[in-house]
Image (cartoon, grey):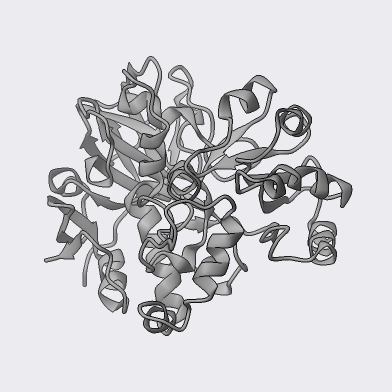
């Protein structure tokens, strides 16, 4: 009988947090959560040379669409709804017809795996809350209580009002808004507000076409704006005015969208917003969906207990250089259980069966249970090979 992995261990040698990271004495992990006292007979995991950060939160993805190729039919669009109409017109053409036929679980799993590999262990789904997303063996945590509408173009006013009113006030309501550079996009915020769907639980996605007056009104009024910079630049040639949004006091969250339009994963979005001279750790710490969303909490070098939350965290080599890619992550841990990491680190966890793998040309080790799911999936993750 294979030994059972125990989620009790002590991390030594790592640094904690993004800005002003400090050396940690010992981090004691029990049943996936950080505890203050020492653990008897617990394995000691040496993460010298690594920085420990909370797992990332992806505030916008369409999880079942990540097996499609990046697609557009024009060099630039003035409104994303025209892109959507182009795609809808080709759904029965190659390759969409073949790719649409894969089972829903496989499509969703691939979207979850995409996020896990880049350290995004909590995800907001902007599509129906398929029950498969909440299975215990789904690779990442998916926001369970939420309301949503697609957009003012692809939903009627009545549908949006109904969806918003059905969303509990303590749950978030997501909607694509002002995803364009034309007059239609510029008028969408005022339309949504006139419908009564702008409130403290409203999360606006994209917001490129919002006017300065819209931003001044919306930033302190809604819950957050989600930006997906690589999607926005690919389709529209620009992103939302994030500086104006922050000056107006609004929260900005980061989303990856799906691979239909995005560069790849959430780390690509982080890279797209990096400033010259930023360290990788600082970049990862800048945009996090912290307020009333997901498992991420503020980082405090002096209060390590605030770091890990549900036991979802990542380790990055302190000497990493931008751009940060998923293969650069030394370790990804969900619920206290290492999922993928550098082979020498994964090998320190006793009774954790692993499978060797190559991720984007770098040797890795993957938790056996996750590896078995990957083998069973009818879709293959590009850049990942199990050995």
Identify the residue at image location x=61%, y=60%.
81
Can the viewer see residue 37 in this picture? no
From the viewer's side, name the closer residue of 256 and 57: 256
| Number of numbered tags placed on the structure image | 0
Q: Is residue 119 shown left or right of residue 57?
A: left
Q: Where does residue 258 sit, x and y in percent of width and height?
A: 45, 58
From the viewer's side, name the closer residue of 18 and 236: 236
Q: In this rendering, is residue 115 above or below 274?
A: below
Q: Is residue 110 shown left or right of residue 310?
A: left
Q: Is residue 118 shown left or right of residue 173?
A: left
Image quadrant where one finds the N terminus: bottom left
Q: In this rendering, is residue 197 above or below 73?
A: above
Q: Where does residue 316 sit, x and y in percent of width and height?
A: 27, 34
Identify the residue at image location x=58%, y=73%.
131
Dividing the picture into quadrants, the one containing residue 67 is bottom left
Q: In this rendering, is residue 197 above or below 22?
A: below
Q: Where does residue 373 sit, x and y in percent of width and height?
A: 31, 72
């Amino acid at each position: 009988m294979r030994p059972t992995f125990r989620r009790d261990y002590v991390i030594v040698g790592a640094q904690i947090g993004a800005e002003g990271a400090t050396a940690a004495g010992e981090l004691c992990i029990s049943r996936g959560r950080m505890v203050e006292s020492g653990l008897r007979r617990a394995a000691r995991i040496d993460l010298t040379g690594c920085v420990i950060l909370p797992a990332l939160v992806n505030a916008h993805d369409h999880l079942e669409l990540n097996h499609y190729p990046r697609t557009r039919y024009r060099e630039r669009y003035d409104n994303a709804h025209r892109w959507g109409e182009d795609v809808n017109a080709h759904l029965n053409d190659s390759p969409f017809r073949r790719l649409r036929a894969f089972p829903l679980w496989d499509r969703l799993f691939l979207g979850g795996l995409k996020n896990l590999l880049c350290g995004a262990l909590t995800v907001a789904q902007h599509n129906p809350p398929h029950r498969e997303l909440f299975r215990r063996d789904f690779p990442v945590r998916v926001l369970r209580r939420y309301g949503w509408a697609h957009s003012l173009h692809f939903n009627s006013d009545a549908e949006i009002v109904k969806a918003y009113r059905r969303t509990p006030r303590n749950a978030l309501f997501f909607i694509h808004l002002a995803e364009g550079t034309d007059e239609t996009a510029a008028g969408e915020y005022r339309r949504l507000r006139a419908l009564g769907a702008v409130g403290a639980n409203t999360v606006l996605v994209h917001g490129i076409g919002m006017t300065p007056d819209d931003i001044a009104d919306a930033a302190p009024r809604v819950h957050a704006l989600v930006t997906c910079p690589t999607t926005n630049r690919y389709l529209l040639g620009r992103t939302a005015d994030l500086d104006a949004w922050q000056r107006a006091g609004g929260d900005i969250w980061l989303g990856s969208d799906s691979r239909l339009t995005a560069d790849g994963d959430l780390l690509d979005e982080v890279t797209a917003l990096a400033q010259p001279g930023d360290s990788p750790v600082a970049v990862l710490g800048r945009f996090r969906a912290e307020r009333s969303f997901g498992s991420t909490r503020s980082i405090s070098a002096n209060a390590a207990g605030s770091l890990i939350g549900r036991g979802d965290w990542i380790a990055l080599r302190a000497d990493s250089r931008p751009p940060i890619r998923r293969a650069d992550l030394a370790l990804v841990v969900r619920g206290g259980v290492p999922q993928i990491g550098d082979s020498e680190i994964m090998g320190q966890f006793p009774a954790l069966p692993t499978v060797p793998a190559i991720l984007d040309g770098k040797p890795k080790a993957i938790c056996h249970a996750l590896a078995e799911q990957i083998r069973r999936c009818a879709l293959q993750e590009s850049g990942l090979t199990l050995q």
